[in-house]
Image (cartoon, grey):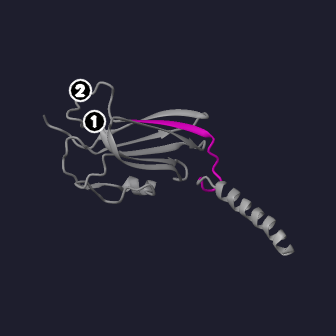
Amino acid sequence: MKSLRYIYPVFYALMATFVLVSCGNDGAGGGVVRDNTLKLTISTRALADELSKGGDDKFSSIALYIFNEEDDYCEYSEVQTGLDNEDTFTRSVSVSNKTKLIYAIANFDDIEKRFSGTITENTTRQELDELSVSTYVFDSDKILMVGSKRVPITSSYVSAEVPMQRLAARVD
């Protein structure tokens, strides 16, 4: 019975160590310190876009990627589907102080759209640079859009807008 008295403190000390070690990993790979905030606004159009018709300036899905410019490390990625025809999407993300390359893809989740690769949260920068659309059926309310922007992180709070461009033209 005396041996059990010593096992419990050792067991609790080991459990506390495991909890602290597992919570200490923020997914920032290589000890990246993320003490800056990047507020992103992804906009499908200007405030007064007279060329939009029938909701073709909205999006129902978005894939967002934030990479370090110098080493292509992905500090943040998000893939959202089932959005309610938004025209603006915002996120505040904790990032390191390295210059960021931001990529965004909207309206990618239709079955009529076929890509040369897959769009997931684990898609690399190289895969995004090489991504192409192989099949696309024009659907006026879900036009495929892409956007990218280089954002230097020059202070602890940086705000940036990523403008989206439609990948289809309409002849009225």
Residue 106 circle label: none
- Residue, far right: 2
Q: Does the magenta stretch include residue 32?
A: yes
- The answer to whether 33 is drawn above or below residue 118 in the figure is above
Q: Identify the image quadrant of residue 50.
A: top left
Foreground of the two, 132 or 54: 54
Please give the range of residues in magenta. 28-42
The quadrant of the image that shows the N terminus is bottom right
- Residue, far left: 172
Mark 1 lies on residue: 57
Mark 2 lies on residue: 50
Amino acid at dot 1: Asp
Would you say 89 lies left or right of 110 here? right
Q: Where is residue 163 in the image (x, y as percent from the top left)?
A: 38, 36
> Considering the numbered disc 1 on the image, is that residue within a helix, a strand or a loop?
loop
> Considering the numbered disc 2 on the image, is that residue within a helix, a strand or a loop?
loop
- Residue, far front: 1
Q: Identify the image quadrant of residue 96.
A: top right
N-terminal-most mark, 1 or 2: 2
Q: Position of residue 45 (x, y in %)?
A: 32, 32
> What residue is at 65 percent from the left and 53 percent from the top?
31
Foreground of the two, 5 or 88: 5
Q: Do the residues labelled 1 and 2 touch (CB within 8 Å)?
A: no
